[in-house]
C-alpha cells in the first residue's frame, strides 16, 4: 500500500511539474494512472498473477499469449447474463 | 451495466488493437453463458470464464460490498480495468468508487492520447480549440471523457493559475445528470515576463485538457418512457491569451457536446 501511494505521488508530481517532467517524447501528455485507489488488486507497476481460462469458444487462453505488442486491456466484469 | 460495459468495450476493441493493445474480459460465469452473450452481441474479444472466481481471488479483487443472494453464487470482482504493458505489468488501473458506475473503454483511449469522436473546431483569438468526446452513445452510470485540444499560435500562451490573468478552465453548466470529476490539466511552463518582472505558469503550443464526467444513474428515470434520449452537455471555456508583447482581455467561448443516451443492454 505504501508503495502504491509513493507511485501515485510520483505520478502526480510528474504531471504537475515543469515543461519536461510531464511530457513524453513527442509531446504527448502522460496518461493518468489511477483515479480511485480504493479498489484492491495489483497496484500500478506490479506484475499481475499468471492465469489461464477458457474463452467463449472453450479454447484455453493464457495471459502470456493474450497480450499484444502494446499490452492488454484486462476487464474484470461481473456478468454477461444479468 | 455489466453487459453494457462489455458491449461498449466491443466497439472500442479495434481502436485498442490498432495501438497494439489486445482486449480480454474475465467473468465469473460458465463458458456456455459467455458463448450465448458473445454470439448475441457479436463480441470480438475473448470472454474468459472464471466460474469458481479463482482468478478473481488470485488477483485479490473479490468485492464484498455486494452481498451474495445464494451461498453458492460466485464471488464477484470489483468491476474495472487493468491496462497492462507487454510484460504483464500494470500501467494503469481504472476502477470506480460507486459500485454501479463503469468507466468506458473510450475514456481509457482518450487518456492514452487517442483522438475523440464528434470533433468540433472553434476559433479562439490566437488559438484553435477542438472539442471531442470519448463516446457519442452513453448508458446510465458510465464515466466518459471530454477532450479539449488547443493549438496556440507561436509566441502566444494561456494561463494555468489565477492571479492577474484568467486561467484556462472548463466551466460546465450545472446539470444534475452529470457528475464532473477533477480535470486533468496539461503540463505547464514557467514564463518570465520581463516588462512586469513576473513569472507565471502558462500553456503553450499544443495541449490537451481532459474532463471526466459520470452520467449519473438517475438518468434511468428519463428513459422510462423512451428507449433513448438526446442529452446535451454545455458550458464555457474560460481563458486569456497573451503574447510575448501583448495581453488580450479575459475571454470565454461556449462549448457543447451532444450524447445519445440509451437503456442498459438487455
Image (cartoon, coloured by chain):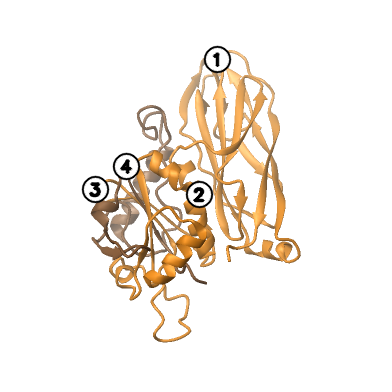
Dot 3 and dot 2 within a common chain: yes
B82 vs B173, left or right, is left
Q: Can I make out residue B201 in this image?
A: no
Residue occupying image coordinates x 31% and y 71%: B57
Q: In the image, which lettered chain appears orange?
A: B
Q: How crowded is mark 3: few (under 14 residues within 10 Å), some or many (20 or more)?
A: some
Residue projecting furthest to the bottom: B71
B95 vs B139, left or right, is left
Residue beneath disc 2: B11
Colour in which the image shows chain A = brown
Residue beneath disc 4: A70
Residue beneath disc 1: B244
Q: How crowded is mark 4: few (under 14 residues within 10 Å), some or many (20 or more)?
A: some
Q: N-terminal of the two: label 2 or label 1?
A: 2
Q: In front: mark 3 or mark 2?
A: 2
Task: Locate residue B215: give its quadrant.
Answer: bottom right
Q: CA gap, disc 1 to disc 3?
A: 46 Å
Q: N-terminal of the two: label 3 or label 2?
A: 2
Q: In front: mark 2 or mark 4?
A: 2
Residue beneath disc 3: B87
Amino acid at each position: 500500500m505504501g508503495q502504491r501511494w509513493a507511485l501515485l505521488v510520483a505520478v502526480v508530481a510528474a504531471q504537475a511539474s515543469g515543461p519536461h517532467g510531464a511530457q513524453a517524447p513527442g509531446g504527448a501528455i502522460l496518461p493518468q494512472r489511477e483515479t480511485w485507489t480504493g479498489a484492491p488488486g495489483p497496484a500500478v507497476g506490479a506484475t499481475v498473477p499468471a492465469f489461464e481460462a477458457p474463452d467463449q469458444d472453450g479454447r484455453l487462453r493464457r495471459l502470456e499469449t493474450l497480450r499484444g505488442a502494446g499490452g492488454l486491456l484486462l476487464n474484470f466484469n461481473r456478468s454477461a447474463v444479468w | 451495466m455489466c453487459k453494457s460495459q462489455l458491449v461498449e468495450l466491443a466497439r472500442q476493441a479495434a481502436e485498442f488493437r490498432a495501438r497494439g493493445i489486445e482486449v480480454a474480459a474475465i467473468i465469473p460465469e460458465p463458458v456456455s453463458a459467455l458463448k450465448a452473450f458473445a454470439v448475441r452481441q457479436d463480441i470480438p474479444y475473448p470472454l474468459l470464464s472464471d466460474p469458481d472466481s479463482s482468478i478473481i481471488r488470485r488477483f485479490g479483487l473479490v468485492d464484498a460490498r455486494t452481498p451474495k443472494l445464494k451461498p453458492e453464487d460466485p464471488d464477484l470482482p470489483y468491476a474495472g480495468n487493468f491496462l497492462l504493458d507487454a510484460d504483464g505489468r500494470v500501467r494503469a488501473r481504472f476502477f470506480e468508487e460507486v459500485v454501479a458506475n463503469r468507466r468506458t473503454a473510450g475514456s481509457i483511449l482518450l487518456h492514452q492520447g487517442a483522438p475523440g469522436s464528434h470533433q468540433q473546431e472553434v476559433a479562439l483569438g490566437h488559438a484553435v480549440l477542438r472539442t471531442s468526446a470519448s463516446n457519442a452513445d452513453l448508458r446510465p452510470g458510465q464515466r466518459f471523457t471530454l477532450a479539449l485540444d488547443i493549438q496556440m499560435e507561436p509566441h502566444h500562451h494561456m494561463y494555468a493559475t489565477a492571479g492577474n490573468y484568467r486561467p484556462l478552465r472548463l466551466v460546465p453548466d450545472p446539470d444534475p445528470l452529470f457528475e464532473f470529476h477533477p480535470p486533468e490539466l496539461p503540463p505547464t511552463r514557467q514564463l518570465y515576463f520581463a516588462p512586469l518582472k513576473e513569472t507565471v505558469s502558462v500553456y503553450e503550443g499544443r495541449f490537451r485538457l481532459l474532463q471526466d464526467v459520470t452520467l449519473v444513474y438517475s438518468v434511468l428515470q428519463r428513459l422510462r418512457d423512451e428507449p433513448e434520449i438526446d442529452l446535451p452537455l454545455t458550458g464555457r471555456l474560460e481563458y486569456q491569451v497573451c503574447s510575448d508583447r501583448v495581453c488580450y482581455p479575459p475571454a470565454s467561448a461556449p462549448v457543447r457536446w451532444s450524447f445519445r443516451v440509451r437503456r442498459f443492454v438487455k
